[in-house]
Amino acid sequence: MNQDIIHVYCMPGLAANPTIFEHIKLPKSQFKIHWLEWLIPNKTDTLSSYAKRLAASITEANVVLIGVSFGGVVVQEMSKFISVKRLIIISSLKTASEKPTSMKIMRATKAYAFLPTALVGKLDMLSKFAVNQKVAQRIELYKKYLSVTDKRYLKWAIKQMVCWQQETALPNLIHIHGTLDHIFPYERINGCITVENGTHIMILNKYRWFNKHLPQLILEGSIAGH
């Protein structure tokens, strides 16, 4: 394989499978995309030890790490163990201060321990109670992309996301965020590349923006006008 090929590793969001990246296309003459999948955590796994296990599967040097939502948090931790050419997070957080207030309250009260993780595995049942076509379509979307339903993983991942306490942003981190993200509100995000009208799932419905701009972001670290 061409030694100049840049290897791009993509980490999906919490409970999501890597097919969320199915519409992301980069020039094959320059890039090779790899999809990362969630591992079931060990009982003793911290976020750091988990990220180290994921990073161990990467054999190339100077790779690009791209993470969506909780996957963005995980790739930040992975970057502490391997040489990285570019670190890009999408619809995510780079410091604990960017968390929504609800998540901060959840951490303080440990309410994350009581979230009904079993619902993720019961989307077929929920679809029967969809009140309109829009809700039904959204549930179908969740059924397609949210396939990691192991309770150990879900409880662990939710706790790690809520309790993540990164104080300062990693150097040279590229943060891409949508103005209509209701999970991690745009108003709390600092120093990001803005995608107008982008929602928390913009990796799915704004993929044309990413296909247009990711090559330049990876190669140069910035894009004109942002």
Image (cartoon, grey):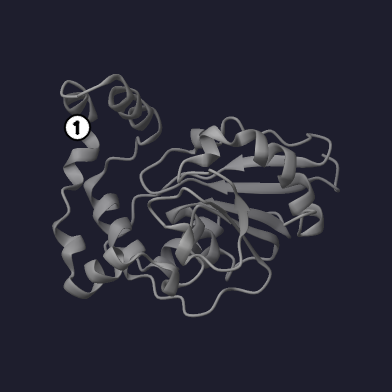
Q: Residue at x 36, y 36 (%)?
A: 146
> Which sits in the foreground, 146 or 135?
135
> Which sits in the foreground, 118 or 62?
118
Residue 14's x, y, as percent? 38, 49
Say left or right for 81 vs 150: right
- Quadrant in which the C terminus is drawn: bottom right
Q: Does the rendering let one see residue 58?
A: no
Say left or right for 22 vs 127: right
Residue 142's x, y, as percent? 35, 32
CA neighbours of label 1 inside 10 A, class few (<14), some (14 to 19), many (20+): few
Residue 22's x, y, as percent? 57, 30
Q: Residue at x 47, y 48 (%)?
A: 180
Please determine whether, in this image, residue 141 is positioned above or below residue 43. above
Residue 110's x, y, as percent? 18, 69
Count of numbered circles in the view: 1
Q: Which residue is mark 1?
A: 122
- Quadrant in which the N terminus is drawn: top right
Say left or right for 182 vs 179: left
Q: Residue at x 27, y 64 (%)?
A: 102
Please determine whether, in this image, residue 166 is positioned above or below residue 192. below
Which quarter of the figure has residue 223? bottom right
Q: Does the rendering let one see residue 23?
A: yes
Q: Residue at x 15, y 24 (%)?
A: 129
Which quarter of the figure has residue 101? bottom left
